[in-house]
Image (cartoon, rainbow, N blue to C red):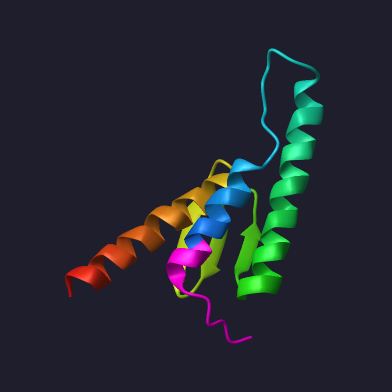
């Protein structure tokens, strides 16, 4: 899949979608149910990123990884962490390109 979407647009899309993930709050409801809902939504977000932008998303016991637009990020705290780390790396790449 060849993606022509500009990197700032992908960052904005991913940031908006991360903000819509279910929250986990130990003060309300069953925390395990909250974790399951959050994880399911994060997996679905990964599937969306794969279908829309050609991302490669891997969920493993030791870490989670996303590679998209030749930018890779990992996190040991779940897919949401990997997605957030990818945004930081993509913004860093944009800043470097603007300085060049």
Q: Is residue 88 magenta?
A: no
Q: Name the quadrant containing residue 65.
A: bottom right
Query: Which of the two residues, 38 or 9, is positioned nearer the viewer here?
Result: 9
Quarter that holds the C terminus: bottom left
Q: Residue at x 53, y 51 (%)?
A: 15
Question: Main structural element of the magenta stretch: helix, strand or loop?
Answer: loop
Question: Is residue 33 visible to the viewer in this orientation of the structure?
Answer: yes
| Left or right of 34 in this view: 54 | left
Q: Residue at x 66, y 21 (%)?
A: 25
Q: Residue at x 31, y 60 (%)?
A: 92
Question: Is residue 79 visible to the viewer in this orientation of the structure?
Answer: no
Q: Residue at x 64, y 48 (%)?
A: 61
Q: Give percent across and percent down for residue 34.
A: 76, 29
Q: Give percent across and percent down for residue 21.
A: 67, 41
Residue farthest bottom in this picture: 2
Residue farthest left in this picture: 100
Magenta segment: 1-10
Q: Give percent across and percent down for residue 23.
A: 67, 31
Q: Is residue 9 magenta?
A: yes
Q: Name the quadrant containing residue 93.
A: bottom left
| Left or right of 91 in this view: 2 | right
Q: How many numbered discs sit on the rendered protein?
A: 0
Q: Give percent across and percent down for residue 49.
A: 64, 65
| Left or right of 92 in this view: 13 | right
Residue 41, above or below 32: below
Quarter that holds the N terminus: bottom right
Residue 65, above or below 32: below
């Amino acid at each position: 899949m060849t993606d022509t979407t500009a990197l700032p647009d992908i960052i904005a899309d991913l940031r908006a979608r991360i903000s819509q993930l279910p929250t986990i709050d130990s003060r309300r409801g069953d925390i395990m149910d909250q974790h399951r809902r959050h994880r399911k939504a994060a997996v679905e977000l990964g599937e969306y990123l794969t279908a829309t932008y050609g991302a490669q998303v891997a969920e493993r016991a030791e870490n989670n990884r996303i590679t998209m637009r030749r930018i890779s990020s990992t996190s040991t705290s779940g897919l949401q962490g990997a997605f957030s780390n990818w945004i930081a790396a993509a913004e860093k790449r944009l800043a470097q390109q603007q300085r060049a």
